[in-house]
């Protein structure tokens, strides 16, 4: 399992890759979008749970 810092880092890295695809450098993969969504949700959940503990 990844720590919160690792998840945030991966999310930023994936979002950077998405920006490159908007510029036409790479092709957009649907798996990429699902990974970004899942990581965003995991980060939000951990942050909310951390506040309530």
Image: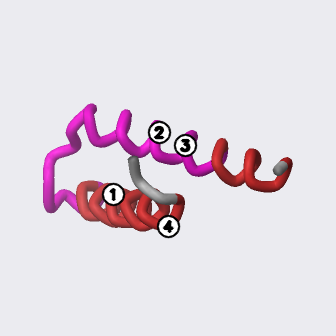
For this orientation, the residue located farthest to the right is 52
Nearer the observer, 3 or 27: 3
In the figure, 40 relative to 3: above or below? above
User: Whole-percent x and y of residue 27?
Assistant: 15, 46
Query: Nearer the viewer's eye, disc 2 or disc 4?
Result: 4
Q: Earlier in the sequence, mark 2 or mark 4?
A: 4
Q: Earlier in the sequence, mark 1 or mark 3?
A: 1
Front residue of 14/29: it is: 14
Tell us which disc is closer to us: 1 or 3: 3
Horizontal arrangement in the rendering, residue 11 relative to residue 27 (left or right): right
Quarter holding residue 23: bottom left
Which numbered disc covers residue 35? none
Dot 3 or dot 2: first in sequence order is: 2
How far apart are labels 2 and 1 at the CA level? 10 Å
Circle on res. 37: 2
Which residue does the numbered mark 3 point to in the structure image? 42
Label 4: which secondary element? helix
- SS at mark 3 in the image: helix
Q: Secondary structure at mark 1?
A: helix
Mark closest to the chain's N terminus, 2 or 1: 1
């Amino acid at each position: 399992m990844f720590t919160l810092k690792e998840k945030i880092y991966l999310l930023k890295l994936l979002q950077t890759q998405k920006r490159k695809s908007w510029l036409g450098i790479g092709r957009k993969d649907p798996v990429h979008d699902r990974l970004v969504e899942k990581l965003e949700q995991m980060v939000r959940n951990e942050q909310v749970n951390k506040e309530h503990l």
